[in-house]
Image (cartoon, rainbow, N blue to C red):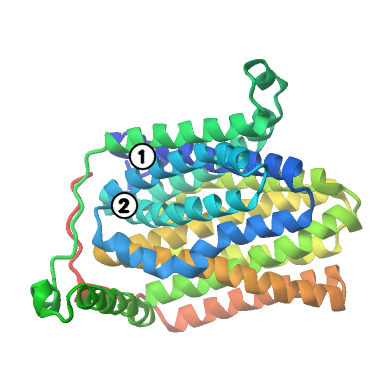
């Protein structure tokens, strides 16, 4: 399939502008995080403040996750992206003033962070849903490879450059503290992203079916304003509950969602097992964690590029299962290793496996999910990622306290390996993907972005 690789998809003007905008916006996300850490270091030092910050940016997904997808499916996704970036730009620039007006009370910052991440939830659902409208179906894998590469590149730059920008002493010459300048720059990145997104020309097909109940005049629905909101709530709930039968009936979507559970399990184990192992057991501190995370990020970037060039030759479900099997083995080796250099190699290889898994998951969803369901599916994915990550982190943390880190990490790797092999066995007896559930609901329009 010539003309479907990583480089060729960047020749599509709309997708190129979209990718540049995402790079800038995601860089801003990480810059925002670094500025928040610098702010808390001054006004609320200690782990308690960091825990409260984590709650502030996790709660929006856990509370509004699937619901946000229902709304994104009803709205114009391009407008959602532009509006969310613009509102985030306004909110972020208010954080320094909130600290000033409240005499350093960080709880006002947590409130703003909650709303910023709420808009980020809507933004991410719309972003993932709109990609098939920018490229043709045969280029989806390449487009998702670029999207994954952009995410890792922006994260790496945001963490490295963001820290340097926030700590730069030169801001004092203009009367700014570093963290304050970080928020101003972050606001600018969101504005630039919004302007770039506004320049994209896109055709979005939205669901045309409207229930007879929704067509009825407001004065016939019930008791005035209350009746209007009751009808709107029932309609929202109906759309939300349509999501789960689709996931269960369509084998491709169900496969991806189950693999995402495993993805979260791996992520939770890394957070609560690998981080303290490197910081304390190996005595490498936070700097050591950063170096291993950097090695994993580089592996993800390189494999995103390679998979975007050659991945169309591979079967995506097999890529996911083989990738998890390799990660399981690497986790078992990590649990036994002590050489920091060797751990860096393992981290690089692990990152190299994670990127093709994530790209294959997104591409499978883009290929089979009806257009007017994409927001719900991708918001449900985000909700699952955050919820299962949190649960697995808590469970594995308790086990590590009761036993010890290395045996638990080895056991997690073994579980991942066994589940991957079991998945391959089941896949062999359950060939193909039943796309009937999706096709019954929607006929995918032919894309004009060839």
Where residue 207 appears, x then y in whole percent?
Answer: 18, 65
| Whole-number angstrom distance, CA of label 2 to CA of label 1 | 10 Å
Quarter of the image holding residue 337?
A: bottom right
Which residue occupies the foreground of this view, 121 or 224? Answer: 224
In which quadrant is the C terminus drawn?
A: top left
Dot 1 crowding, Cα within 10 Å, few <14, some 14–19, many 20+:
many
The residue under label 2 is 130
**Which sits earlier in the primary sequence, circle 2 or circle 1?**
1
User: Residue pushed farthest top?
Assistant: 173
Q: Which residue is mark 1?
A: 18
Would you say residue 153 is visible in this rendering? no
Vertical side of 234 occupied by 326: above or below: above
Q: Are marks 2 and 1 in contact (CB under 8 Å)?
A: yes
Q: Residue at point 18% right, 57% down? A: 205
SS of the residue under disc 1: helix
**73 or 341: which is nearer to us?**
73
Measured as percent of width and height from the top left, residue 69 is found at: 36, 64
**In this picture, residue 90 sits left or right of residue 303:** left
Residue at 35 percent across and 67 percent down: it is 376
């Amino acid at each position: 399939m010539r003309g479907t690789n990583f480089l060729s998809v960047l020749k599509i003007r709309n997708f190129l502008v979209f990718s540049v905008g995402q790079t800038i916006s995601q860089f801003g996300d990480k810059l925002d995080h670094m500025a928040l850490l610098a702010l808390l270091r001054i006004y609320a030092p200690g782990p308690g403040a960091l825990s409260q910050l984590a709650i502030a940016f996790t709660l929006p997904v856990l509370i509004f996750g699937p619901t946000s997808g229902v709304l994104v499916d009803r709205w114009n996704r391009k407008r959602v992206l532009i509006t969310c970036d613009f509102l985030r730009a306004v909110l972020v620039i208010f954080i320094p003033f909130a600290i000033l007006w409240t005499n350093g009370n960080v709880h006002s910052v947590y409130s703003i962070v909650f709303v910023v991440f709420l808009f980020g939830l809507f933004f991410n659902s719309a972003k993932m849903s709109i990609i098939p409208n920018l490229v043709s179906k045969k280029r989806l894998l390449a487009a998702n490879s670029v999207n994954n590469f952009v995410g890792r590149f922006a994260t790496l730059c945001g963490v490295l450059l963001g820290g340097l920008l926030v700590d730069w002493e030169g801001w004092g010459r203009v009367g700014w503290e570093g963290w304050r300048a970080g928020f101003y720059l972050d606001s600018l990145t969101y504005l630039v992203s919004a302007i770039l997104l506004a320049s994209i020309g896109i055709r979005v097909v939205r669901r045309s079916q409207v229930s007879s109940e929704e067509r009825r005049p407001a004065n016939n629905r019930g008791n005035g304003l209350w009746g209007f909101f009751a009808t709107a709530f029932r309609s929202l709930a109906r759309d939300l509950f349509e999501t789960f039968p689709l996931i269960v009936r369509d084998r491709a979507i169900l496969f991806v969602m189950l693999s995402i559970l495993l993805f979260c399990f791996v992520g939770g184990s890394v957070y609560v097992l690998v981080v303290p192992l490197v910081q304390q057991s190996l005595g490498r501190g936070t700097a050591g964690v950063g170096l291993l995370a950097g090695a994993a990020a580089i592996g993800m970037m390189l494999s995103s590029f390679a998979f975007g060039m050659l991945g169309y030759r591979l079967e995506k479900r097999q890529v996911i299962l083989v990738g998890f099997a390799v990660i399981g083995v690497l986790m078992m080796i990590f649990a036994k290793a002590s050489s920091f250099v060797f751990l860096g190699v393992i981290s690089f290889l692990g990152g190299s496996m994670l990127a093709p898994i994530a790209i294959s998951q997104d591409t499978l969803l883009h290929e089979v999910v009806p257009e007017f369901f994409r927001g719900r599916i991708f918001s449900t994915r985000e909700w699952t990622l955050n919820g299962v990550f949190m649960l697995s982190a808590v469970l594995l943390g308790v086990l590590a306290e009761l036993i010890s880190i290395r045996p638990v990490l080895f056991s997690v790797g073994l579980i991942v390996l066994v589940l991957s092999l079991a998945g391959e066995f089941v896949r062999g007896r359950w060939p193909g993907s039943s796309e009937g559930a999706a096709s019954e609901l929607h006929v995918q329009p032919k894309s004009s972005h060839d």
